[in-house]
Amino acid sequence: QVQLVESGGGLVQPGGSLRLSCAASGFTSDYYSIGWIRQAPGKEREGVSCITNSDGSTFYADSVKGRFTISRDSANKRVFLQMNSLKPEDTADYYCALVLTSYVCSLGYYEYDYWGQGTQVTVSS
């Protein structure tokens, strides 16, 4: 069965960095996309970034452009989110999510069929 496991969250000061990891398993297709979606308390879910495995194309929300970088290790079905220059407004639960048979990734959280359990990111002094 498909499984996604996130790691790497934690508490960091404003201006600091964190690297989130997502390990995917339970499927064999190379045509899939993985997105990072976050949800802060009392707020709507927000697609932060996504990557298409077949060609490595990426998208970013305007709120994180220039600060976050998504990358992949296709051989091991891992996706990473490097988060730099973190701000208090980045505080949220971060989820990685997967859609199979995907040729172009999307920041729309409703596009994704499988979700990890989430990892908490807190940016505070």
Image (spheres, rainbow, N blue to C red):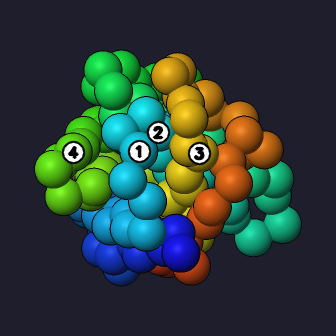
For the point 55% across and 30% down, which residue is it?
Answer: 102
Looking at the image, residue 39 sits to the left or right of residue 64; the answer is right
Q: Which mark is residue 29?
A: 1
Instruction: Say few, some or many: other residues with alpha carbon within 10 Å of mark 4 (under 14 / 14 to 19 / 20 or more).
Output: few
* Image point (38%, 53%), residue name: 28
Q: Disc 1 or disc 3, which is closer to the eye?
A: 1
Q: Are marks 1 and 2 in contact (CB under 8 Å)?
A: yes
Residue 75 or residue 52, whichever sits in front: 75
Q: Nearer the viewer, residue 24 or 16?
A: 24
Residue 99 - label: 3
Q: Position of residue 99 (x, y in %)?
A: 59, 45
Amino acid marked by disc 3: Val
Find the distance from the CA under tag 4 to the CA under tag 3: 15 Å
Does label 1 or label 3 sit earlier along the sequence? 1
- Residue 27: x and y in percent read 43, 59
Task: Kindly identify the residue that appears in the image at 61 percent across and 29 percent down.
Answer: 106
State the image coordinates of residue 63 (x, y, percent, origin top left): 54, 32
Q: Which mark is residue 74?
A: 4
Q: Residues within 10 Å of mark 3 (few under 14, many from 20)?
A: some
Look at label 2 and name its amino acid.
Tyr
Under circle 4, the secondary element is: helix
Q: Nearer the viewer, mark 1 or mark 4?
A: 1
Whether pointer 3 and pointer 2 mark residues with C-beta atoms closer than 8 Å, the reply is: yes
The residue that mark 2 highlights is 32
- Say which quarter of the image contains residue 9: bottom left
